[in-house]
């Protein structure tokens, strides 16, 4: 069953799953596959050498899917910054409806995109940064926990706390990012207040991901311990796959006496990292991976993965709901039992009762009644809607009174029915006696209807 969240409604997608923007991975092949699978695929702008190359990739993606997809624009701390405004303008020109932003000082780009009504999904690793992004007018936040791949921030707050803090303090809807790979994770994220999830590393390990098969198999074989934090000394902490390149980088980070970035730069070269995905050598350079690699055990298609996640999430939510038992309640619901009938009434504010063999229940008078003494049934004079009361204006006591009055009216109605039947069947009864009884019965029916109408009007 498709999920219906603020994310799916706003983006026009079937499943609350976003493929995060990933350098050297977010190409049309992957983005279109995720979108076709019901999620939101994302092209990574800076994977393209120029804004015009991004335009070509967007147009290529449009030929591969008719469903919504987005563009990621990450603002990097670099001396030779790309023309972010030009990349954003291409997204505008090509009719992109959703842009994922991340990084430092995104204000000008967000303003440029918001001016034409583009939905902004901004990635944050702290609540403070999220509040700043809200002030810039973003539509959704992607809350990145410390488990995530790539830039993890400097606060080391994991998602279990970060998502709950977001739920408590943010007025803008958010999705969860970092540590998600399956439906159980999606169910957990929704339970913590998120409107969906963002996955990066999990989508790297799919059939359509445009990286070498050996890297995908390396991910499958890895455990949650196979990542490394580097560049913390320079306040640019990143989580990368643990390999020979990260070992060299962390050695420099520990032992450098100058603290100059030039000493570590060769070890964290982006060009060498790109070659990893082409030549399939996991030790050739640095590449991002989250702790979620410990949860990845196969290489499915994006369609199979997204379908599985949806199914697992639904099963998990239903299983959790099944853990709630009426027996755990500290309040015994009053039961209204009509003698010598099959009608059982409970107030609207209690869930449907589950009766246990041999258990005893209390009726309105406080008498203990065995479940064997009555049957659960329905009565045409007492439709379920009539058992509700004014939910917004009446209190509990008034609800009991209204329901009790209805029960009394139904009882009177039944007594009058019985009198009519007896009068008609008894020899010697004249028409006037029968008519008097019928008139009394009509008054009772009118009273019953009035209570029905009164209760329903306030519902």
Image (cartoon, rainbow, N blue to C red):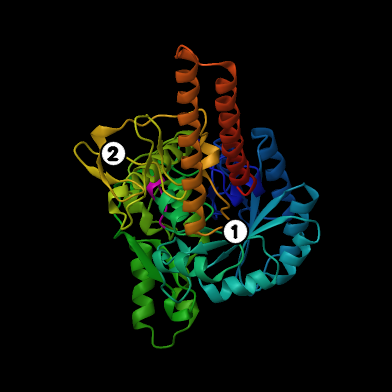
Q: Is residue 181 magenta?
A: yes
What residue lies at 47% left-to-right and 25% top-to-bottom?
419
343 vs 32, nearest the viewer? 343
Q: Secondary structure at mark 2?
A: loop
Would you say 328 lies left or right of 75 here?
left
Residue farthest left in this picture? 358
Task: Decide if residue 241 is in sight here.
Answer: yes
Quadrant assignment, res 171: bottom right
> Which numbered mark, 1 or 2, is in the foreground of this view?
1
Q: Circle 2: is it few (<14), some (14-19), or many (20+) Cα within 10 Å?
A: some
Q: Is residue 249 above or below residue 408?
A: below
Identify the residue under disc 2. Answer: 355
Task: Decide if residue 296 is in sight here.
Answer: no
Q: Is residue 356 above or below residue 44?
A: above
How far is disc 1 from disc 2 in space, using C-alphas?
A: 31 Å
232 vs 253, nearest the viewer? 232
Residue 393 shows which numbered tag? 1
Q: Circle 1: is it few (<14), some (14-19), or many (20+) Cα within 10 Å?
A: few
Residue 126, percent from left and from top: 51, 72
What residue lies at 38% left-to-right and 69% top-to-bottom?
229
Would you say 227 lies left or right of 46 here?
left
Q: Is residue 163 above or below residue 182?
A: below
Q: Which residues are magenta?
A: 179-184
Q: Secondary structure at mark 1?
A: loop
Q: Is residue 205 magenta?
A: no
Q: Earlier in the sequence, mark 1 or mark 2?
A: 2
Residue 339, percent from left and from top: 35, 34
50 vs 336, nearest the viewer? 336
Q: Are marks 1 and 2 in contact (CB under 8 Å)?
A: no
The secondary structure making up most of the magenta span is loop
């Amino acid at each position: 069953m498709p999920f219906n969240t603020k994310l799916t409604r706003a983006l026009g997608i079937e499943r609350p799953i976003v493929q995060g923007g990933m350098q050297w991975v977010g190409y049309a092949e992957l983005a279109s596959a995720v979108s076709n699978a019901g999620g939101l695929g994302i092209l990574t702008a800076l994977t393209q050498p120029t804004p015009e190359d991004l335009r070509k990739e967007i147009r290529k993606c449009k030929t591969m899917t008719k469903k919504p997809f987005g563009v990621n624009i990450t603002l990097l701390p670099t001396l030779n910054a790309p023309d972010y405004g030009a990349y954003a303008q291409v997204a505008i020109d090509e009719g992109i409806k959703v842009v994922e932003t991340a990084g430092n000082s995104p204000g000008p780009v967000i303003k440029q995109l918001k001016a034409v009504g583009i939905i902004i999904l901004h990635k944050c690793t702290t609540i403070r940064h999220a509040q700043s992004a809200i002030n810039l007018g973003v539509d959704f936040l992607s809350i990145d926990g410390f488990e995530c791949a790539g830039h993890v921030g400097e606060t080391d707050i994991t998602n279990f706390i970060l998502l709950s803090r977001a739920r408590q303090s943010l007025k803008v809807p958010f999705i969860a990012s970092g540590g998600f790979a399956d439906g159980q994770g999606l169910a957990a994220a929704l339970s913590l207040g998120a409107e969906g999830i963002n996955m990066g590393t999990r989508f790297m390990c799919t059939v359509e991901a445009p990286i070498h098969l050996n890297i995908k198999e390396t991910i499958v074989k890895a455990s949650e311990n196979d990542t490394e934090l580097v560049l913390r000394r320079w306040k640019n902490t990143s989580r990368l796959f643990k390999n020979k390149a990260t070992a060299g980088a962390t050695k420099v980070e520990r032992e450098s006496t100058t603290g100059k970035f030039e000493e570590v730069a060769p070890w964290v070269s982006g060009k060498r990292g790109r070659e990893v995905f082409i030549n399939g050598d996991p030790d050739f350079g640095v590449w991002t991976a989250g702790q979620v690699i410990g949860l990845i055990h196969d290489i499915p298609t994006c369609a199979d993965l997204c379908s599985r996640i949806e199914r697992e999430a639904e099963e998990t939510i239903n299983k959790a709901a099944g853990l709630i038992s009426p027996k755990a309640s500290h309040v015994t619901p009053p039961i209204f039992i009509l003698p010598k009938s099959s009608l059982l009434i409970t107030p609207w504010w209690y869930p449907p009762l589950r009766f246990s063999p041999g258990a005893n229940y209390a009726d309105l008078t406080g008498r203990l009644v065995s479940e064997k003494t009555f049957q659960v049934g329905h009565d045409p004079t007492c439709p379920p809607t009539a058992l509700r009361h004014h939910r917004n204006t009446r209190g509990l006591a008034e609800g009991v009174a209204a329901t009790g009055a209805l029960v009394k009216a139904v009882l009177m109605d039944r007594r009058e029915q019985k009198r009519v039947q007896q009068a008609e069947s008894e020899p010697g009864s004249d028409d006037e006696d029968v008519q008097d009884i019928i008139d009394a019965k009509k008054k009772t029916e009118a009273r019953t209807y009035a209570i029905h109408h009164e209760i329903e009007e306030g519902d």
